[in-house]
Amino acid sequence: MANVTQASLNDFTAKTQNYLLQVFNNELVFDEVVDSWPFMNTPWMVLTILSGYLLFVLKLGPNMMENRKPFNIKNIMLLYNVIQTLYNSWLVTLLFITPGAINYYVNHLCHPLPRHHNQFLIHELNKASWYFFLSKIIDLLDTVFFVLRKKQSHVSFLHVYHHVNMVITCWAYLRFIKGEQLLFSGFINSFIHMVMYSYYFLSALGPHMQKYLWWKKYLTRMQIIQFITIMAWHAGLYMFNCNFPKLFIMYVVCDMVLFLYLFSMFYMKTYKPKITLKLHGH
C-alpha cells in the first residue's frame, strides 16, 4: 500500500513539473534588444538597490536619525514632487502619442500578433514599460524622505511592501513576459501617481494649503478602485481565454487582492474613526 501511494505521489509530482516546464516554455518571452536594456540583463542590480533600500529605511536610516533633528528638505521635496508629477503625466500620454498604439491595442488586445509581425511598435510599447519600471525605482525615494524627515511611522508594512513589490513585479514582467495587455494597468497606475504627487506638491508648500487639500482621502479611494479595476481587467483576460500568460494573470490577481485588503484596512483605520466621531457628535 505504501509503495502504491509513493508511486502515485511521484507520478503526480512528475506530471506537475512537466506541466509547469511546458507552461514556462510557452509563456516566457525573450528578446535580445529588450533584455539588453539597463537593469534588464540580470536581476542583481535591482536586488542590490532593493537590499540597500530596505537596509536604509528599516535599520541604518532610523539609527542615523535617532539623535538628529529632521532634515529640512522642503525644496528638494517640492522639486521631487514636480518631477514625479510631470514624469507620470508623460507616462499617461505615451499610449496616445505612440504611433499605432491605440489602434493595435483595440484590435489585438486579447490575441496579440506575434512580436516579429510588428517589432517596432512592440519595442516602443516595451520601452513604455521600461520607463514605467524606472518610475517604480524612483518611487523608492518616498520612503527615504520619510526617514530623513523623521516620519518613521509612515514607513509601514503596506508602504514598504508596496514599493518593493512594484519594482520586482515590473522587472519580472518586462524581463520574462513582455505582453501588451498590462499596459492598461500601467496607464491607470501612472494616472493615480500623477494625481498623488500633485497632492504631495501642494501639501509640501506649507500648512496654509491644508484647507485646499480636503480631497486627500479620495486618493486612497482612487487606489482601491484601481486595484478592483485591474483585478477585473485580468479576470476578463482569463475568462475570455486571451493569449496572455495564465500564471502571470493569476499572480497579478492575487497581488491585487492583497493590495486591496491592505489599502482598505489603511483607509478604515485612517478615516473611519473620524466618520464615526462626526456621527456621534451629531
Image: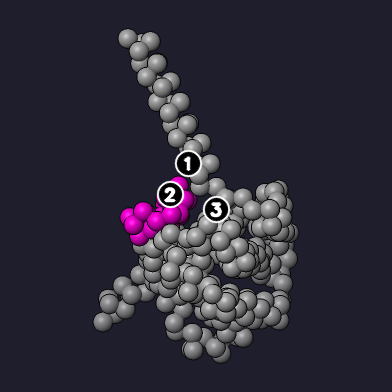
Q: Which residue shows up at 53% across the image and 41% down it?
A: 25
Choose top left, top right, bottom left or bottom right for residue 258.
Answer: bottom left
Earlier in the chain: of badge 3 and badge 2, it is 3
Q: Is residue 4 found left or right of 116 in the rendered image?
A: left
Distance from label 1 to label 2 (Cα)? 9 Å
The label number, if any, that marks residue 246 in the structure image:
2
Magenta residues (range): 236-254
Viewer-proximal residue, 120 or 181? 120
Callout 3, which amino acid?
A: Ile
Callout 1, which amino acid?
A: Val
How dense is the environment of label 2, judged by Cα within 10 Å: few (below 14), some, or many (20 and up)?
Answer: some
Q: Which residue shows up at 68% across the image and 53% down it?
A: 32
Query: Considering only vertical position in the picture, is 84 above or below 253?
Result: below
Q: Which residue is mark 1?
A: 23
Q: Is residue 264 found left or right of 143 in the rendered image?
A: left
Element at label 3 = helix
Looking at the picture, how far across and down is residue 119, in whole percent?
Answer: 60, 63
Q: Which residue is mark 3?
A: 177
Is the residue under label 2 in contact with that under label 1 (CB below 8 Å)? yes
Element at label 1 = helix
Query: Considering only vertical position in the picture, is 245 above or below 92?
Result: above
How dense is the environment of label 3, judged by Cα within 10 Å: few (below 14), some, or many (20 and up)?
Answer: some
Does residue 269 show up? Answer: no
Viewer-proximal residue, 218 or 116? 116
How dense is the environment of label 1, judged by Cα within 10 Å: few (below 14), some, or many (20 and up)?
Answer: some
